[in-house]
Structures are given as structure tokens and as C-alpha cells.
């Protein structure tokens, strides 16, 4: 489904600020895999997400989706196959446009956009049905501007929009981090539901270790631009937070700065 | 007085097409496009040149629209592919168009390359063509009799101009409303709203910006082509301050009629353009003001349109708070 092969990225190369963002990243996701990623700030998690989405290109290495090499494909072309939800609830929607118009934008993701009316009657029914799944009563506010929604509602909508066209890869970039605990809980539940429903291949960055353990079938830990730990399905069920901390200490020979890892 | 206002409304409706173009860039795309000052003249120059060379005025106008579209696309390419700041891209294109406009009008002169103006005194225009058809209908007499019976001394020579510009502008408004609801239109609006988001939904924002600027300047050039035929004159400096007039129309319209939906906003922009012309016509009737003061008056109108709504809102807010403070004890 998704393959990263020997991905390397250095920021500000040749200057005193030079920083190795990613060093020899190899990752392989099978269809239906749900991988959670943890690691402290600067570990390279977001850089890796940006590599996959096409917002950044690797210095060398190959990104392939569904067996096709997409390394040189610009972001807007690649995003036919990739759904993405950002940390900032404001980032995933267009605030001055209505809920149904936003959904129409998401709906045309994998089709070429033409001069058809975006919110046609038939589509509106489909939009309504999809919104009902969220249980936020948004289906009755189709023509409300998205800027008027709360952060949680916007993030739920972003999530729905990202998964609308059943993308090959779903990228979740700390998408619950900016919400209060009860909203974060709601978004987590919706995430689980939407991913399960379509068996989406998902990559989720989180600073919340418990969330990383609860969700998904695989877990990876990153540090200093490298993947330092991969936990497969069979071991993940029994893993606990202290286990993870101990694991980090064993590999790095230093104590994990748990505050940084947990709170970001 | 009535005739002056009648003329102001006619012009306002023509300038409304330009204002819709400005709305498309400034509001929808969130791109402050200064190409307008140049592309308005490009439209006027192209239409005037072709009319003078004997082409059919409708064809001349259509070519003017295409010329405006190309000019807008160039600004878009400068910004997206050349990574030049939006304001600067527009200014560069505006200044380049000045020379191009001279050359376009120069096509009508045999011994010079550039020409600063073209009078169209005896040429056929869209308006004279339509007038020929209109005058046979006899509607002018009916309407003017109606006006006379209401006690007006001076009546308009013809209603044909008013009718045709109204028809054209309504069609453009309906087209704009429709376009902004299509998939491409939605994507253009999203580009002005949240580029990062629409890129993650597989839209090429560069192409959308270029297309949006092209369409905007096509409208601006259309307006310029009509103004040249309306006033029977094209001049290389007729576009100076056009962007401010466009903005004035958008701001006045939005302040008075609101922006709740697209359909309402496009109406507001058109109404804003007409209101601006009326204010200007009234201001010019004040004794100590001269037609040379027009740009100053324009600036003052825009400043007022920007500041007044703030005052009004503050006043409303204060009233509401005062009301709540009075009856507030019961509520709390």
C-alpha cells in the first residue's frame, strides 16, 4: 500500500543550522494497517508525514503508493490518493464556505473538476447521510458557514472530508491535540469508526501514548530522524506506557523525557 | 438633475462589470490584483481600435474580453510560477500594459507606432447598433410620456443604452453566480479561503489562481470595451485609479447589502457600483468641485465607506450593551 524506502532529508544543508530530519527511513504498510507514531518533538514525525503527502520531497529515497512511485509527484496530484487531517482544526476546512460546499470540495478529490454544480441534489442526500454518522447534528446545518462551527465540529468535519473518497492512505497529524479532552475523545471515536468502516490504511501521529496504544494495529517510535522501535500487532495488545518508556531507555541508553513526549 | 442621474446609473451599470471582476480577485481569490488599471484600458483600446478599423462592434468587444483574459493570466503566471508577490505582479503587469495599450491603439495610425487615444465619433458601436433596433419598437415614447406625465421636463434621448447594459450586467451576474457554485468555482473560492486545505483535496492552486485572475480581468476588459463605446472615446490614461473605483463599489455594496450568500454579494457589488456613480454625480454638482477633483472624491468615498460601518457597528454595540445593562439584573 505505502512504501518508504531509504528516505533521507536534511534541512539547511551546509549551514550551521544543518539538521538531519530523516535518516534512512524504511516503512511498509499493508492494506488496512493502522499505524500510530510516537516520538518527542523534532523526532521527524511531521517531516515524514509531509514526505508522504508531497508537501516535502526527500533528498533521496522512494515513496510509493499502491505500487506506484510517487516521489516526484506534486502534493496536489498525490492528494488524490491521500486523505489528511491537520492538528489545527482551522486547517482542514474552508471557513467562509458552507458545510455542504466543503463536502463538495472533498467529494471531487479523485475526479476532475468541471462545470457541474458542486452541491447537486443527489449529492446533498449523500452528504446528509455521511454527516449523520458523526452524530453532531451537522446534517441539519448544511448551509451554515464552517467558520461558525466549534473546533471539535470542524475537526470532525475535516475527518469526514478526508475519508470521504476512501483514500489509499489516511494521514492524521496530531489531529486531536488542539482539542479539549472530551472533544478529543469524540474525535478519537469518530476516527476509529471511519477507519474501521472502510478499512483505511492509516498513519497517525500522536503525543498521547495511551491513544497510540489504544488505536491501530501497529506502533512505531521515532527519535532523531529514525524509526527506533516497531511494535507489531501481536505485541501491541499487551504493551503499556511503562513498557514503552523502558523500551526507549534500552535503545537510546537515556531516559525518555516523558513530558516532552506526552505533551509535545 | 434627472438626466445627470440617469447617465450616472447607465455608467454605474457598465462599471459594475468591472467591479464584479475586482470582487472575484479581491474577495473570492483574496488576491489584491492591480492589473485592473491596465486591463481596463486594454479592453477599451482593443475595442476602439477594432471598431475604428471597421470590425463589427460585437466582435471587437469579444476580442477585448479575450485580451483582458490573457493579461490576467499573465499576472497569475508571474505570481504562481515566478513566485512574485501578488501586489507586485499586478503592478508589473499594469505598467507593461500601458505600453501595450499604446501599441494596440497605434494600429489605427499609419505613421506612428503608439497612439494615446482614439475618438469614435462616427463609428458604429454596440450601442448604436442596438439603438437602431430599439428605436423601431417605440418603447422610448411610452416611457418618456410616462416620465412627462410625472412632471419631468427633460427626458432621456433614448432608453436603449440603459436596457442593453442592464441586460448584459444581469447575464454576467447570473453567470458569475452559477460559476462560483460549480466544482471549479468552489475550488477557486477555497483557494482564496484556505490554500493548504484545497491542495490536500487534489486541486492545483496555481492553475486556479491563474484562471481566476484571467476571468476577473476578462470582465474588467469587457467593462472597458463598453465604456469606450459608451463615451465614444478610448484613452491610455482612462484606467488610472480604476482599481480604487472597483474596490469602492465592492466595499459600498457589501456595507449596504451584506454578503450572506454569493447571489446577494454579486448583487451588492453591482448596486455598489451604481451607488458610487450616483454619489460622484451628486458631488460634481457641488459648485466648488471640479471634474478634476474626481479622484479625490473617489478616495474620500472609499475612506468613508471603510470607516462609517465601523462607527455604525460600534454605536449598535453600545446601544445593545446599554440595553442589557438596564434589563440585565433580571437576566442574571
Image: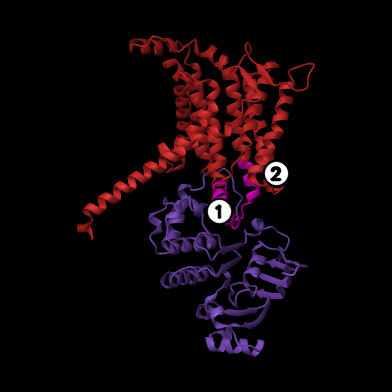
Chain colours: A purple, B red
Image point 50% across, 62% down: which residue?
Answer: A89
Q: Which residue is mark 1?
A: B194
Graded by Cα atoms within 10 Å as few (under 14), some (14 to 19) or many (20 or more), the crowding at tag 1 reads some
In the rendered image, the quadrant that contains the N terminus of chain B is: top left
The image shows residue B143, relative to residue B293, as above or below, that is above
In the rendered image, the quadrant that contains the C terminus of chain B is: bottom left
Residue sitting farthest toward the right: B111
Graded by Cα atoms within 10 Å as few (under 14), some (14 to 19) or many (20 or more), the crowding at tag 2 reads many
- Residue B82 pos. (x, y %): 72, 47
Residue sitting farthest toward the left: B330
Q: Label 1: state its secondary structure.
A: loop
Is residue B196 shown in magenta?
Answer: yes
The image shows residue A241, relative to residue B332, as above or below, that is below
Q: Is residue B87 visible?
A: yes
The one nearer the camera, B95 or B221, is B95
The image shows residue B187, relative to residue B223, as above or below, that is below
**Residue span colored magenta:** B187-212
Is residue B287 shown in magenta?
Answer: no
Residue sitting farthest toward the front: B288
Q: On what subunit does the disc labeled 2 rest?
A: B
Image point 43% across, 64% down: which residue?
Answer: A134
Q: Quadrant of residue A52?
A: bottom right
- Residue B276 pos. (x, y %): 47, 29
C-alpha gap between disc 1 and disc 2: 21 Å
Image point 51% across, 18% down: which residue?
Answer: B161
Q: Which mark is residue B78?
A: 2
**Are both tags, 1 and 2, on one chain?**
yes
B206 left or right, relative to B18: right
- Residue B314 pos. (x, y %): 37, 46
Q: Label 2: state its secondary structure.
A: helix
Amino acid at each position: 500500500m505505502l512504501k518508504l524506502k531509504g528516505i533521507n532529508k536534511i534541512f539547511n544543508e551546509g549551514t550551521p543550522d544543518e539538521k538531519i530530519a530523516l535518516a534512512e527511513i524504511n516503512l511498509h504498510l499493508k492494506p488496512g494497517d493502522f499505524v500510530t507514531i510516537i516520538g518527542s518533538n523534532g523526532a521527524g514525525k511531521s517531516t515524514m508525514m509531509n514526505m508522504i503527502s508531497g508537501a516535502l520531497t526527500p533528498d533521496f529515497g522512494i515513496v510509493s503508493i499502491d505500487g506506484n512511485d510517487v516521489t516526484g509527484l506534486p502534493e496536489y496530484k498525490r492528494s488524490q490518493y491521500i486523505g489528511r487531517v491537520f492538528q489545527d482544526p482551522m486547517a482542514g476546512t474552508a471557513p467562509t464556505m458552507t458545510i455542504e460546499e466543503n463536502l463538495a470540495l472533498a467529494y471531487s478529490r479523485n475526479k476532475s473538476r468541471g462545470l457541474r454544480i458542486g452541491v447537486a441534489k443527489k449529492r446533498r442526500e449523500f452528504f446528509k447521510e455521511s454527516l449523520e454518522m458523526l452524530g453532531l447534528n451537522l446534517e441539519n446545518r448544511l448551509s451554515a458557514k464552517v467558520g461558525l462551527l466549534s473546533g471539535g465540529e470542524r475537526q470532525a468535519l475535516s475527518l469526514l472530508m478526508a475519508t470521504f473518497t476512501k483514500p489509499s492512505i489516511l494521514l492524521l497529524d496530531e489531529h486531536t491535540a488542539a482539542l479539549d479532552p472530551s472533544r478529543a475523545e469524540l474525535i478519537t471515536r469518530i476516527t476509529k469508526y471511519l477507519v474501521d468502516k472502510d478499512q483505511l490504511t492509516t498513519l497517525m501521529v500522536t503525543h498521547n501514548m495511551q491513544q497510540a496504544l489504544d488505536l491501530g494495529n501497529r506502533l512505531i517510535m521515532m527519535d532523531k530522524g529514525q524509526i527506533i522501535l516497531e511494535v507489531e500487532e501481536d505485541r501491541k495488545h499487551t504493551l503499556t506506557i511503562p513498557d514503552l518508556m523502558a523500551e526507549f531507555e534500552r535503545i537510546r541508553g537515556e531516559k525518555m523525557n516523558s513530558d516532552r513526549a506526552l505533551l509535545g | 438633475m434627472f438626466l445627470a442621474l440617469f447617465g450616472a446609473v447607465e455608467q454605474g451599470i457598465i462599471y459594475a462589470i468591472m467591479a464584479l471582476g475586482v470582487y472575484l480577485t479581491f474577495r473570492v481569490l483574496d488576491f489584491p490584483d492591480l492589473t485592473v488599471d491596465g486591463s481596463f484600458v486594454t479592453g477599451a483600446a482593443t475595442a476602439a481600435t477594432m471598431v475604428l478599423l471597421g470590425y463589427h462592434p460585437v466582435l471587437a468587444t469579444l476580442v477585448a474580453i479575450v485580451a483582458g483574459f490573457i493579461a490576467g493570466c499573465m499576472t497569475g503566471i508571474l505570481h504562481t510560477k515566478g513566485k512574485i508577490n501578488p501586489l507586485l505582479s499586478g503592478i508589473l503587469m499594469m505598467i507593461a500594459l500601458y505600453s501595450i495599450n499604446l501599441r494596440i491603439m497605434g494600429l489605427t495610425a499609419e505613421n506612428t507606432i503608439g497612439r494615446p487615444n482614439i475618438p469614435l465619433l462616427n463609428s458604429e458601436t454596440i450601442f448604436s447598433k442596438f439603438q437602431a433596433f430599439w428605436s423601431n419598437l417605440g418603447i422610448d415614447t411610452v416611457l418618456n410620456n410616462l416620465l412627462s406625465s410625472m412632471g419631468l421636463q427633460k427626458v432621456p434621448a433614448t432608453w436603449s443604452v440603459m436596457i442593453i447594459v442592464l441586460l448584459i450586467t444581469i447575464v454576467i451576474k447570473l453567470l458569475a453566480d452559477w460559476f462560483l457554485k460549480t466544482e471549479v468555482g468552489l475550488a477557486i473560492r477555497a483557494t482564496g479561503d484556505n490554500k493548504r486545505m484545497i491542495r490536500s483535496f487534489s486541486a492545483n492552486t496555481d492553475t486556479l489562481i491563474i484562471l481566476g485572475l484571467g476571468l476577473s480581468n476578462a470582465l474588467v476588459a469587457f467593462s472597458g470595451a463598453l465604456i469606450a463605446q459608451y463615451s465614444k472615446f478610448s484613452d491610455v490614461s482612462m484606467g488610472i485609479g480604476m482599481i480604487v473605483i472597483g474596490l469602492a463599489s465592492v466595499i459600498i455594496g457589501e456595507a449596504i447589502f451584506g454578503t450572506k450568500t454569493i447571489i446577494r454579494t454579486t448583487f451588492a457589488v453591482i448596486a455598489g457600483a451604481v451607488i458610487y456613480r450616483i454619489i460622484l454625480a451628486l458631488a460634481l454638482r457641488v459648485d466648488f468641485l471640479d471634474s478634476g477633483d474626481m479622484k479625490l472624491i473617489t478616495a474620500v468615498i472609499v475612506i468613508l465607506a471603510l470607516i462609517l460601518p465601523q462607527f455604525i457597528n460600534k454605536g449598535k454595540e453600545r446601544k445593545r450593551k446599554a440595553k442589557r445593562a438596564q434589563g440585565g439584573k433580571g437576566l442574571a
